[in-house]
Image (cartoon, rainbow, N blue to C red):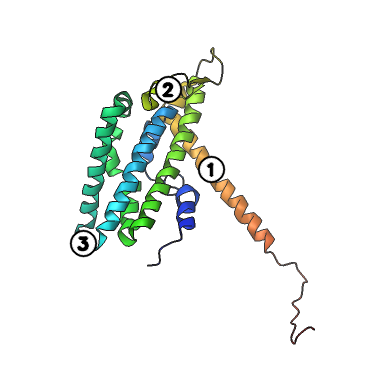
């Protein structure tokens, strides 16, 4: 199996094969905890760390794993890194860890991580697997942050609230009031239906952009009716 070029791996992770918008994997945490940007960044960083580390580890031991135990072995590797992330969050971002709740340990069963470990890392060498995991994680995190930002603005009228839970006192004054101090807030935006609506609109927007790009490309190579090919032989001096 030929290893994809790093440019292709990057495009796949960020856009072409984005875990959230194309593969539609990991939607449970995406819909559940993206009520604010800080939640989205926290979960995104945790997922990216686990995805990158597990991809690298699975790739390094892929030749020693028989096909019969590949999946359970991958789950054990992922669970190890999830435990490390849990301990780090408990030590440095405990309040954010409590806010994310059960969705941190549930990263173990995130289909985006299991899918990349099985589909890519188990078939490719270490460096491409590392890049693939990182880019897939960044693509997933970008969608989380976008959904979180839209829901926070519509639901609370603010942006970057409680960023100090993740970055400490330096981010205590980062909160931006976007829709005015008297904005009543749209409750539906912070509830699960709001997450479904925003995610659906993002998927629709991506599909529309892809369709427009494909249409533009097809128009560029369109052959004009009535045109003729001219065969030239010999040498022009």
Work out whether 179 lies above or below 138. Answer: above
Q: Nearer the viewer, residue 161 or 57?
A: 57
Question: Helix, strand, or loop for circle 3?
Answer: helix
Q: Quadrant of residue 228?
A: bottom right
Give the residue pinned by disc 2: 170
Foreground: disc 1 or disc 2 = 2
Image spot of residue 198 (x, y percent): 49, 34
Identify the residue at horizontal 38%, vertical 40% (top origin). Answer: 27
Labelled disc at residue 64 = 3
Give the residue pinned by disc 1: 204
Inspect this view and state whether residue 66 appears: no
* Badge 2: residue crowd in 10 Å (few <14, some 14–19, many ≥20): few
Work out whether 229 lies above or below 135. Answer: below
**Marks 2 and 1: in contact by CB < 8 Å?**
no
Give the left or right position of residue 84, taking residue 147 as reference: left
Which residue of the protein is positioned furthest toward the right in this rendering? Answer: 237
First in sequence, mark 3 or 2: give its number: 3
Image spot of residue 153 (x, y percent): 51, 24
């Amino acid at each position: 199996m030929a290893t994809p070029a790093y440019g292709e791996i990057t495009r796949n992770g960020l856009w072409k094969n984005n875990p959230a918008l194309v593969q539609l994997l990991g939607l449970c945490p995406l819909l559940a905890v993206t009520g604010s940007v800080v939640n989205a960044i926290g979960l995104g960083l945790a997922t990216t760390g686990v995805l990158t580390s597990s991809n690298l580890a699975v790739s390094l031991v892929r030749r020693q794993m028989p096909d019969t135990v590949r999946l359970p072995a991958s789950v054990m590797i992922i669970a190890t890194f999830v435990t490390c992330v849990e301990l780090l969050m408990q030590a440095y971002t405990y309040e954010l860890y409590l806010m994310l709740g059960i969705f941190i340990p549930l990263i173990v069963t995130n289909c985006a991580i299991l899918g990349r470990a099985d589909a890519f890392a188990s078939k490719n060498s270490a460096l491409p697997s590392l890049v693939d995991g990182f880019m897939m994680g960044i693509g997933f995190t970008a969608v989380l942050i976008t959904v979180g930002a839209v829901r926070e603005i519509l639901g609370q009228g603010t942006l970057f609230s409680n960023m100090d839970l993740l970055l400490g006192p330096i981010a205590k004054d980062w909160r931006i009031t976007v829709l005015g101090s008297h904005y009543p807030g749209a409750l539906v935006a912070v509830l699960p239906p709001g997450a479904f609506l925003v995610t659906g609109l993002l998927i629709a927007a991506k599909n529309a952009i892809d369709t427009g790009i494909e249409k533009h490309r097809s128009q560029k190579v369109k052959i004009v009716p009535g045109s003729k090919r001219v065969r030239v032989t010999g040498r022009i001096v």
